Amino acid sequence: DKVKMEDIVSLCKRRGIIFPSSEIYNGFAGFFDYGPLGSELKRNVKDAFWRSFVQCREDVVGIDSSIIHNPTTWQSSGHLDGFSDPMVDCKETKLRYRADQLFASPVVLEEDGSTVGYVCVLEANDEDMVKDAKKQAKRLLKEKDLKGSKIQAFQFRDLTEIDEDVMAQVPSPGSGKPTLTMPRDFNLMFQTSVGAMQDASSVAYLRPETAQGIFINYKNVLDTARLKLPFGIAQIGKAFRNEITPRNFIFRSREFEQMEIEYFIPPGDDVWQPYHEKWIADAREFLLKVGLKDELMGYDIHEGDGLAHYARACTDITFRFPFGVQELMGIAARGDFDLTSHTKGSGKTLDYFDEQTRERFTPHVIEPSLGVDRCILALICSAYAEDEVNGEKRSYLAFHPSIAPVKVSVLPLVKNKEPLVLAARQLFEKLQVRWNCSWDQTGAIGRRYRRADEVGVPFCVTVDFETIEDDGAVTIRDRDTTEQVRIPIDDVVDYLGKKLMD
Ligand code: ATP
């Protein structure tokens, strides 16, 4: 029953949800374009987030900052010095790999063109990751009928433990031979230059996260929005990371969108924990509400080495994607690291005055951060379903109505009977004012239902001969149950309004 990535990618392409970017120029690795249905889906996901966490809460306000900030921002935030991944180059193929990913997956070891075995090299402080990679390697050996081959497993706690001797044994996935350079830090920020001059002073960066735009506006918002602690500032927008190995479709791309909140709370060692827990719970509730499958979600609690030095705690909400369990969203307790760093960097005090206690202090912060595209991939994986209708296989997307790109499809039974088409058209125009609707008049009705199902349209409304000649009613078909009900044409808006819950 497992969803396959290739089915999802091909469905997205075939039905105009997501295309590889710049396809007419053979694409551009790590970039994607959302098509007519994908852009609706994306808008719905962002709207749902905004409605839940900004509009339905009195303690959170939104902003929309510029993508390029004063470059000093990234000096203060630590991104210029520390926002990097370990990278290795293949000396032969010139291909680049993210060292931690390279070492976490089993690779084919070839000699003189023939496969002689698999080597599994691991960078892992995480025992589960080690187990997982070993399992993967065993499966590969079985698949390729190389049962006799040895699985070699190196285990490191840290990439700095890797020395030249080890690197000399690690085969490059590109060439199959060990021709890799030693790991080195690669900064993930995209550089650009601002202004007509191109020199060191004009260097600027595309933001690798939306969060810093919130911190640098902390004072502006505090001074204008009449907020009392605890309060949050939310932002949705593009982020850019020059990922060394973008992969798994929109899971890891170089241009993506984030939905982030900085929730400012009073300082203190015993204050942040309940807030952190509440945000984890609220985040999970949101993800369930928009349609993520509960059984595919989990938690990854960062501890010890896995926790950034300034963070108090970080819990990821994970999702079981077809390619494995991965981070979907992070909820971090970041202490006062960010506001303090920007206070130091800018010389402007970013603090809070509590009128009741007459105290001045730097607030701490809880940061929920969710990738729009990753969320969309998880939603598609959750919604993808196959069953049998009238003995025929059907695949459909069981999207929650709130995020479904098209809510209603209107189908005139035939296209050559004018009064029938006219009645359908009038209904379509009435529905269109409220929801994104589609009009489909070609092909057998069963095929039209299937087309709508495939992109997750919750309801199809069919206008037939009886509608105009007899009962003035239409047939409404439910995507998930395929059940049909007969409703007077004048009641359709009310009926769907209740079903679509808006
Ligand atoms: P990863 O370890 O997967 O690279 P991260 O821990 O660096 O992710 P954060 O910096 O915490 O990610 O970013 C917050 C959220 O932004 C992630 O949970 C994810 O949903 C999203 N995100 C981060 N990088 C990417 C990317 N390259 N493509 C798509 N979404 C991303």
Image (spheres, helix red, strand yellow):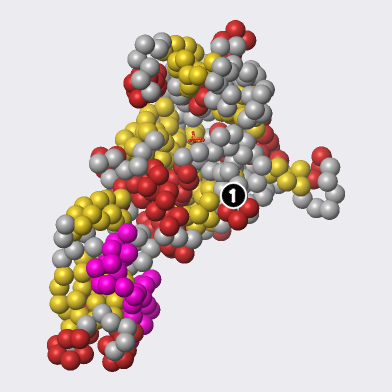
What residue is drawn where x is 63% and y is 42%? 349
Per the rendered image, the range of residues in magenta is 426-454
Q: Name the amino acid type tagged 1.
A: Gly
Residue that extends furthest to the top in the rendered view of this protein = 165
Q: Report x, y in % for residue 144.
A: 38, 23
Residue named by callout 1: 27
* Residue 317 left/right relative to 87: left
What residue is drawn where x is 59% and y is 49%? 27
Q: Secondary structure at mark 1?
A: loop
Image-quadrant location for residue 94: top right
Between residue 97 and residue 23, name the one nearer to us: 23
* Residue 114 left/right relative to 494: right
What residue is drawn where x is 29% and y is 76%? 411
* Residue 382 left/right relative to 81: left
Q: Report x, y in % for residue 321.
A: 36, 39
Question: Does residue 343 show up?
Answer: no
On screen, residue 144 above or below 440: above
On screen, residue 308 above or below 255: above
Between residue 214 and residue 380, name the one nearer to us: 380
Q: Report x, y in % for residue 274.
A: 34, 37
On screen, residue 278 above or below 462: above
Q: Is residue 453 magenta?
A: yes
What residue is drawn where x is 45% and y is 60%? 16
Q: Report x, y in % for residue 115.
A: 48, 19
Residue count near mark 1 (Cα–Cα under 10 Å), binned few <14, some 14–19, many ≥20 = few
Classify the position of the N terminus by image quarter: top left
Task: Classify mark 1 as within 8 Å of ligand 1 or not, answering yes or no.
Answer: no
Number of marks in the rendered image: 1
